[in-house]
Amino acid sequence: IKRIERFLGLEDTEEYAKPGESEAHETQSKLGSVVIQDATFSWGARGTVDLSANEPKPEKRGVFPRVFNKKRRENATGKEAQHEHEKEAVLDQPVLKNVSVECEAGKLTVIVGRVGSGKSSLVQGMLGEIKKVSGSVRVYGSIAYVPQTAWIFNATLQENVLFGKPLDYERYAKSLYVSALESDLDVLPAGDLTAIGEKGINLSGGQKQRVSIARAVYANADVFLCDDPLSALDPHVGRAVFDNVFSKKGVLKRSTRVLVTNQLHFVPEADRVIWMEDGAVKMCGKFNELMQDEGFQKMMAENVNEENESLSNRDASGGINVESMSVHKQHTARLLEKVNSNFNRQDTLMSREDRNKGTIGMQAYLDYAKATGGYVLFVSVVLFFGIVIGISIVNNWWLSYWSEQESINPEKHSTGFFLGIYFALAMAFAFLTFVRTVIFLSMALKA
């Protein structure tokens, strides 16, 4: 209840990233672009910082709670107020300061930086999921978001990809192919119609992330915000997904792609690079421009050893090994046939139970009566129910009779006479109800 109360007490969210109706004409001309001007962000009321995690918990003494004197209560109140003040101070601290960036429509913008530099917070700011303290944020067009941790719900793989949108077979098959899910359909019992458990329990981390990418591709949005989606993939799979989805020859080449990544071998292929450092934009521009900076060179050099395997997949000329369009179409056609064939062999984690409809036969009642301890005991309990109901009816009748006699012939019987009989009936009703309940529960548990 307290969690619901805190949730309902939160401030209303401000949809600052969505252009207003007055900007409709500007939206058409800037469709697909993301513009942030001198913006500062903090987690504010939407954040959740627990400062009490490391505080010592009060010692329990005895069964009864401690009774604090006035001075202790005042000290406790002061500590709580200080704790709340510290909590609010942490939440109000800016996580991004004076950010001004623009992601051009139809271009690939890559956000890089060390761990904790504010890359994910910048994407949250574009989504409008973090409190904007100052400045302006505008995302022109529809958004598809791929988080760091894929969100999978309990449904079929197909439903996880469609995400409520109508099924377009060709677009659906292409989404599965470019997300490298084609081979997984052969492993799953019913292909794309296999039921996925809650939180993707029967999928690996890489499979869940590729389902999330396929969902974003199928959404066919204007802007794709992707928060390090390739980190959970094997190097060769990540390379294939990048080539087929995010690269200049990928399926999203006409859409705006904002990609957060720690795999810096993808950075040279970006149209624009945003370098984050300590919650601020250190530099922003083309890759060749950023390479003139010694700090950026140092950061790239730190990741060279980790990326050697991926870099070796590039050819000598620096190009990308992207499959030809004819091969791509053949794969899509083959995958479309596989998707259609899956309707004939559905398999799910949960099966529907067989059930009959109609009235319950007399034999079911007899079997239940026998299982409770025998027919005699069962009939006795039924009589007990009847006796208890009968006493309840007599009790009510006696109360009405008492009222009637008091008005017709008050001197015939004393008040004690009526009250004594009423009390006896009430006690009999309570005792028999208790006995009936105990016997009935014992029989029900035995059955």
Image (tube, rainbow, N blue to C red):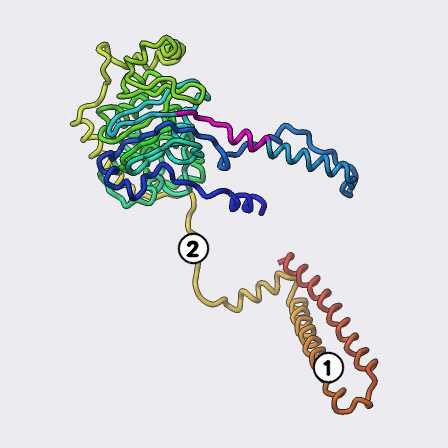
Q: Which residues are magenta?
A: 86-98
Amino acid type of the residue tagged 1 in the rendering? Trp
The residue that mark 2 highlights is 354
Q: Residue at x 23, y 9 (%)?
A: 316
Q: Between disc 2 and disc 1, whose residue precedes? A: 2
Q: Are marks 2 and 1 in contact (CB under 8 Å)?
A: no
Residue at horizontal 43%, vertical 55%? 354
Q: Residues within 10 Å of mark 2 (few under 14, many from 20)?
A: few
Query: Within the image, what quadrant is residue 401 found in?
Result: bottom right
Quarter holding residue 70? top right
Which of 385/58 is in front?
Answer: 58
Q: Is residue 262 visible?
A: no
Q: Amino acid at mark 2?
A: Asp
Nearer to the camera, 277 or 409: 277
Q: Secondary structure at mark 2?
A: loop
The percent position of residue 7, horizontal first and vertical second, equals 52, 44
Q: What quarter of the picture does the C terminus occupy?
A: bottom right
Q: Which residue has dot 1 on it? A: 398
Residue found 68% across the figure and 29% down from its top: 56
Q: Residues within 10 Å of mark 1 (few under 14, many from 20)?
A: some
